[in-house]
Image: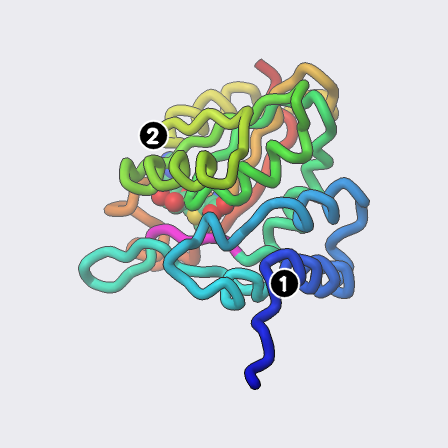
Amino acid sequence: MTTPEPGDAVLRGALVEALRLKGCLRSPALAEAFGAVPRHLFIPHVAVEEAYRDRHIVTKRLPDGEAISSCSQPYIMAVMLDQLDVRPGHRVLEIGAGTGYNAALLAHLVGAAGRVTTIDIDADTAAAARAHLDSAGVIGVRVICGDQVALGELQAEAGGSLEGPRPGATHLLLTEHRTPAQDCPRRRGEEPRWHLTSPWSC
Ligand SMILES: C[S@@+](CC[C@H](N)C(=O)[O-])C[C@H]1O[C@@H](n2cnc3c(N)ncnc32)[C@H](O)[C@@H]1O
């Protein structure tokens, strides 16, 4: 007799516990979001067990093998979301939609009164994010295909002298600071890096 595979809800619970032990799920709302959003529906090409490991999953590579899109490590997402301190009713702009999983976590955190817009430079990736969000039944997320650079210039103009998070402001979450694939930091010999800025009022 074979042992039944654990269902995705059980695997999600184990992921939440693993993140809690790593100290990155300080708010109950964040733990709830990770417990509710089905990560496996955002990375349907991997086994369900794999989807709930605390690991990043590469989702797109250039012909030379360089990874240009991935579903980030849940730990990294938890740290970013914890720092951003997203609350119900907030409006959030995420740069780098990737699979759409992080946008779904954001949608859970902002609730029905909030709004999430996520942007990705890669058309296939943006389309896949839209499809994943729909298959997971996530509502309240707008997916745009576009380049963060124009938005980054606007952010620079804002000069960093912005108020703290408040309802009604748009909170900008830069999940990865990368220019278009052909000019990415690694190609210039630099390490790619992510950072977040909160908030960006508009
Ligand atoms: C690490 S993935 C983001 C993970 C994603 N948040 C998730 O939940 O799966 C980074 C994404 O940023 C996108 N990207 C890279 N440069 C960009 C740019 N200049 N403007 C918009 N998106 C960009 C890539 O196409 C890639 O899908």
Element on which disc 2 rests: strand
Point out residue 108 in the picture as x, y percentages from the top left corner.
Answer: 65, 35
**To which residue does mark 2 refer?**
145
**Is 61 above or below relative to 134?**
below
Depth check, mark 2 against mark 1: the one in front is 1
Disc number placed over residue 119 in the picture, else none: none
The x and y percentages for residue 142 are: 46, 25
Q: How many numbered circles are shown?
A: 2
- Amino acid beneath label 1: Leu
Residue linked to disc 1: 11
Q: Tell me the quarter of the picture where residue 161 sits.
A: top right
Task: Quarter of the image for the C terminus: give it.
Answer: top right
Relative vertical location of residue 73 with respect to residue 138 in this rendering, above or below:
below
Residue type at tag 2: Cys
Q: Residue at x 51, y 33 (%)?
A: 94
Left or right: residue 74 versus residue 127 is right
Mark 1, secondary structure of its residue? helix
Tell me: residue 63, above or below residue 196.
Answer: below
Q: What is the spatial separation of the Cα atoms under label 2 and label 1, in whole angstroms?
A: 32 Å
How many other residues sit within 10 Å of disc 2, few (<14), some (14-19) or many (≥20)? some
Range of residues picked out in magenta:
68-72
Spot occupied by residue 137 in the image (x, y as percentages of width and height): 52, 35
Comparing 64 with 58, the one in front is: 58
- Residue at 38 percent across and 37 percent down: it is 131
